[in-house]
Amino acid sequence: MMLPPQPPAWTDEDVESLRPRTLDEFVGQRPAREQLSIALRAARERRETPDHILFSGLPGLGKTSLAQIVARELGATLHTTTGPALERARDLAGILTQLQEGDCLFIDEIHRIPAAVEEYLYPAMEDFAVDLVVDQGPNSRTVKLRLQRFTLLGATTREGLLSAPFRSRFGLPIRLEPYPPEDLAQIIERSARLLKIQIDPDASLEIARRSRCTPRIANRYLRRVRDFAQIKGCPRVDIETARVAFEGLRVDTHGLDELDRSILETLARAGAPVGLKTLSAAVGEEDDTIESLVEPFLLRQGFLDRTPRGRILTPLGYDVLGKRPRPAPSAE
Ligand SMILES: Nc1ncnc2c1ncn2[C@@H]1O[C@H](COP(=O)(O)OP(=O)(O)OP(=O)(O)O)[C@@H](O)[C@H]1O
Ligand SMILES: [Mg+2]
């Protein structure tokens, strides 16, 4: 059965109902959970605000969820903004001066803060103070304004784009890793309970294996497989139903969807390095989307490689397509 065209696998639906609410509900990522649990407990015992925390990792691994958990476990008010929303230092000053003692400020996509705003954040992070320009014209002067002690929670999918001085101002860097299938299966089972979906353990694992190591995608596929089971009149999701549903979704056993395969096919046809712009034109997807959402998985699985001259298909990539590399043209 062919299903209608699907929105990309990384989009969220109805996120809030499935978000883990406490550190205990947060599945996997043991090192991250342990670090956070110690830091939060110590801060609570000292009655101090914890260090600023930087969450980094690929999209959909749980950065926003963890930031919300931190605020909840601290019993702190959470204020939320994003890097691109902080266009001018003034935007940031407005937020910082509103913060109360012990509040958490979450800045998502923190790598997209403009440089001038980033520097304005340094004294706020270190000394809990900012410079404010008051009055205009000849009377204009800067005054130092003390801020209440707060905890900055930053999230980024591109930690490498943060400047070293900025990164070093976070006392607690938390790196989220891609999830192994067993952890994803546990997340799927938890979500199934919350959504009142009956699912067999081997079906959960089947969904987990195709979910590109990412909880957001796992939750999304769980809903799609559930829809499929419902239409087929199956009260329970079993492995057979899951497999047929994935055929309909055109997601293969490696977790590759049509866009992934079309990227790999383009590289196979080229048989030579392909630049990002060319690739994006060939498959009809934004280059940014390819670079930040699609490619990291393909790279990590070893299906493609980046070279200075562009992307190339690896031998493993050819295997996945069931193709052989074209023989290199003989030098005549
Ligand atoms: N460890 C986990 N345990 C259970 N569910 C999780 C976990 N991590 C993520 N999720 C689920 O995956 C969804 C996506 O997670 P979240 O929004 O926190 O990711 P993110 O890292 O902030 O992504 P982005 O970079 O796109 O903002 C959440 O709604 C949640 O349901
Ligand atoms: Mg997020």
Image: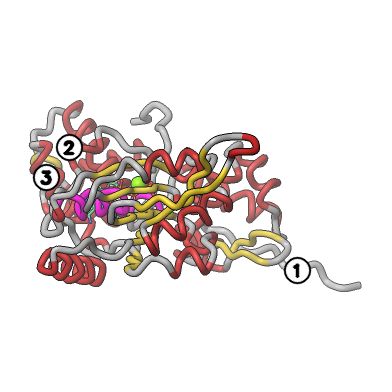
Q: Nearer the viewer, residue 30 or 92?
A: 92
Q: Main SS of the magenta segment?
A: helix
Pointer 2 residue: 17
Pointer 1 residue: 328
Residue density around tag 3, few if under 14, some if 14–19, many if 20 or more, within 10 Å: many
**Residue 80: percent from left, percent from top:** 33, 41
Pointer 3 residue: 199
Q: Nearer the viewer, mark 2 or mark 1?
A: 2
**In the rendered image, which quarter contains the C terminus?**
bottom right
Q: Do the CB atoms of the residues marked 2 and 1 lie less than 8 Å apart?
A: no
Q: Nearer the viewer, mark 2 or mark 3?
A: 2
Amino acid tagged 3: Ile
Q: Do the CB atoms of the residues marked 2 and 3 lie less than 8 Å apart?
A: no
**Residue 276: percent from left, percent from top:** 66, 51
**Residue numbers of the magenta segment:** 58-72
Q: Nearer the viewer, mark 3 or mark 1?
A: 3
